[in-house]
Amino acid sequence: MADDLAKLTTELNHLLDTRRKGVKSYEISSSGGMSRRLEYRSDAELAEVIADLERRIAALSGGPVRMVRFSSSKGI
């Protein structure tokens, strides 16, 4: 699971960097010497993939916080 999380995080970082540069394609090299080229038709398609990766990472890392408790005082 940690390995999957690391791979997803690495891929998310590549996609965010690609989107920041305004590029619609990038190449991924794996440890086995294989590489693949990913190309997206539009920024909207790239944004969908990024959102999907963020959801998958959140699910693997425990998900969102569901309850927040506040404690306050008047300082007296």
Image (spheres, rainbow, N blue to C red):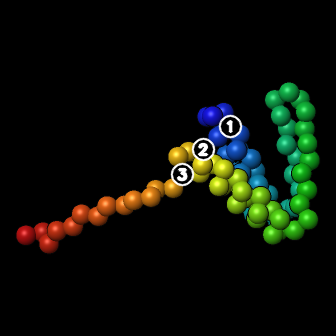
Determine contact: label 3, label 2, CB under 8 Å. no
Q: Residues within 10 Å of mark 1 (few under 14, many from 20)?
A: few
Name the residue carrying label 2: 60
Q: Amino acid at mark 3?
A: Gly
At mark 1, the secondary structure is helix
Relative to 47, does residue 6 appear above or below in the rendering? above
Residue visible at 83% across and 65% down in the picture: 45
Name the residue carrying label 1: 4
Q: Amino acid at mark 1?
A: Asp
Q: Position of residue 42 (x, y in %)?
A: 87, 68
Relative to 50, does residue 10 appear above or below in the rendering? above
At mark 3, the secondary structure is loop
- Mark 3 or 1: in front is 3
Left or right of 50? Residue 22 is: right
Nearer the observer, 49 or 21: 49
Mark on residue 63?
3
User: Which residue sits furthest top?
Assistant: 32
Determine contact: label 1, label 2, CB under 8 Å. yes
Left or right of 73? Residue 67 is: right
Residue 32, quarter of picture: top right
Report how far apart the C-alphas of labels 3 and 2 lie in the structure.
Answer: 7 Å
